[in-house]
Image (cartoon, helix red, strand yellow):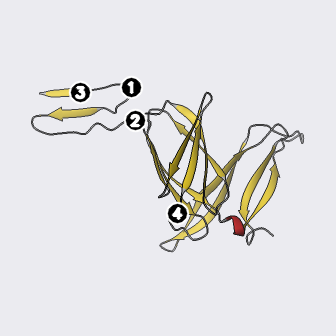
Amino acid sequence: STTLFRSKTYADVNVSNNLQAQLSPTNTLTIQLYDEETNAKILNHSNLDLIDGTFAQNYTSETGNFSMLNLTSYYYELIYTSTGFNLRSYYQNLDETNANLTLYLLDSAKSVNIKATVYDASLESQENYTIKVLRLFIVDSTPDWRVVEMQRTNFNGEAILHLDKDDVK
């Protein structure tokens, strides 16, 4: 016989005969921090703020790994940093799904802050737009563009981006 378990918190699992299944929570967010320049895993003391429309939760890690279970479906802002790195942000929608994210930090000694402004066609500044910063990584001789930072524009249409000073001309 087959029994189907279904709840808001856990994914669908089929169990039949003597097979065993492990329930895995939905809306799970797993994060690993990496150095943007070297693509090496960050193993320092790290902080992450998970923000939705009603609360902010702070997490700390000594290994650059974070795991958050049973989150409410929402479009979250993640603000994160590690010792010797600039503060960065990222946005992630969780809607009855799980997400495994690789987030990148830039060594604060190698970065420069750049103000970006978003305008519409009539040159009006645009509030609450998300700017994605992508960086080219070469993986097994294949180019791979990855999001290394996201920032939202303020009421003036501005956002501060943290970029590698060697890449800014």
Q: Is residue 162 left or right of residue 29?
A: right
Instruction: Indicate the quadrant where residue 58 lies.
Output: top right
Is label 4 in a helix, a strand or a loop? Answer: loop
Question: Which class describes the residues within 10 Å of circle 2: few (<14), some (14-19), or many (20+)?
Answer: many
Q: How many marks?
A: 4
Which residue was labeled with disc 2? Answer: 26
In the image, residue 44 lies at what x, y percent?
53, 62
Quadrant where the image shows the N terminus? top left
- The numbered mark at residue 133 is none
Front label number (2 vs 4): 4
- Answer with mark 2 or mark 4, whichever residue precedes in sequence: 2
In the image, residue 153 lies at what x, y percent?
77, 42
In the image, residue 155 lies at what x, y percent?
82, 36
In the image, residue 143 lies at what x, y percent?
56, 68
Question: Which class describes the residues within 10 Å of circle 3: few (<14), some (14-19), or many (20+)?
Answer: few
Front label number (3 vs 2): 2
Quadrant where the image shows the C terminus? bottom right
Instruction: Indicate the quadrant where residue 134 lies.
Output: bottom right
- Answer with mark 4 or mark 3, whichever residue precedes in sequence: 3
Circle 2: residue type: Thr
Circle 3: residue type: Leu
Above or below, comparing residue 154 to residue 161 in the picture:
above
